[in-house]
Image: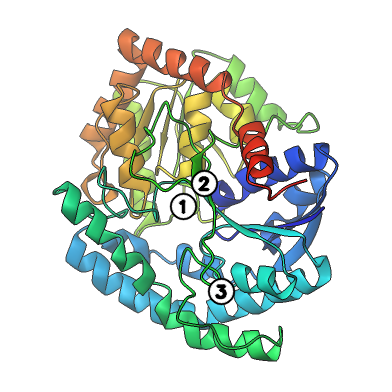
Amino acid sequence: MNILLLTIGSRGDIEPFIALGIGLQAHGHQIVVCTHQRFQSIVEDHGLNYQYLSNDLFKLMEGGSVESMGSLFKGINTAIRLMKLAKPINGQLMTDSIKAGIKAQPDLVIYHPKCIVAPSIAEKFNAPAVMALLQPMLVKTSDFPLIGLPNISGVTNRLSYRLASLGFKPYLKQLNLLRKSLLNLPKLSDKAGVFSMNTGKAIPVLHAFSKHIVTRPQDWPQNTVLTGYWFLKKHNDFSPDKKIIDFITDGKPPVYIGFGSMLGKDPVKTARLVIDAVVKAEVRAIIVTGWGGLKLGDVPSQVLVIDNVPHEWLFPQVAAVVHHGGAGTTAAGLIAGKPTLICPFFADQPFWGDKVAALGLGPTAIKQKNLTIDNLAEGIVQMVSDKQMQHQAQQIAEQLSQEDGIENAIKWLKQQGLLT
């Protein structure tokens, strides 16, 4: 089968789809991964076909706006402002996605929820569409609310998911224009929705995270499955810089600190805070600046600053990890068996921070707006000294290693008659 994988976002949103693509290709399928151009080399290095998406989304992600989403009301205001800025960017992403779909002519479309044009591409080629979620963010349940909202009661939790569809409505006009001009499809009917095709047929949902971290809600529908994480295995061709090897082997295992593509309002201040916390905690640290990155000047000898390195290679060699709590980074730290301190900005990041702390896999999460030298240093010291936390992290890693999320996903797709 020709399978189109569509994904939008940061590296943590991309790597699980690459991992799934590798698994599907091993089963004899032809795979095309459509994602941002900055990830083209990663896709192609893993032997998959690539199709282009614009990088313009990162202008928003790396612009510091997300740090102002700390409270519910500030978050709503920021979300409205970002939605206005994102409209032309999303229009281009939809156009790029359609062009990729026309080239791929897929028999099956598996897509990230940000790719709202994916069901229309599937409709054009009379192919099934399957949504893939890296966090429990859209399928309603009484167990927890829509990501970013407070957990008040089972009733309000279920009702909160109605807000999810509101996030798609501002783009329907653009989507309908593109359906007509590029796909020669009619306007979306009233039957179309977040989880339904234009005919009203339900869209199946794959959840690519582990039952050991999030228990499957009993009120999820039958066309929704929890597969386990889709881990991208260590790439044998990766060759780290000698300075990284030398630093890792020159003393006690360092602590990893990195906030992905999240910049925050004042990256210079954040960088200084992180370094001062490392010094106070009396540990060695590798600070990864990422694409957005922290701005760092002179650093002490106990700190190594690098731009980027694969998590699957680095995390097994560190003592603990500190990060923003993206789904992919969180999963990478857990499978490596490392205590984790999450310092979330917004969206699903606080959810993972709460989960990690509740399971005894790390200290209580520290929101970015509340981050100080003292509380960051305290969290780091706890991770490198708490033997029970370290043992718990190792136990979870062992459980995750026994769970093959990719094969579980492929098996389920076959059972549903979506994959031959």
Is 277 on the left-hand or right-hand side of 330? left
- Pick whichever, 80 or 343, lies toward us: 80
Picture quadrant where residue 38 is located: bottom right
Label 3 – label 2 distance at C-alpha: 46 Å
Of marks 1 and 3, which one's residue comes earlier in the chain?
Answer: 3
Asked which secondary structure carries label 2, the reply is loop
Is 221 on the left-hand or right-hand side of 269? right
Picture quadrant where residue 215 is located: top left
Q: Name above or below for residue 42 compared with residue 190.
A: above
Tag 1 and tag 2, C-beta contact below 8 Å: yes
Say which amino acid is labelled 1: Lys
Q: Residue tagged by mark 2?
A: 289
Say which amino acid is labelled 3: Thr
Residue drawn at x 62%, y 39% as measured from the top left? 412
Q: Which mark is residue 199?
A: 3
Q: Name above or below for residue 149 compared with residue 181.
A: above
Q: Residue tagged by mark 1?
A: 295
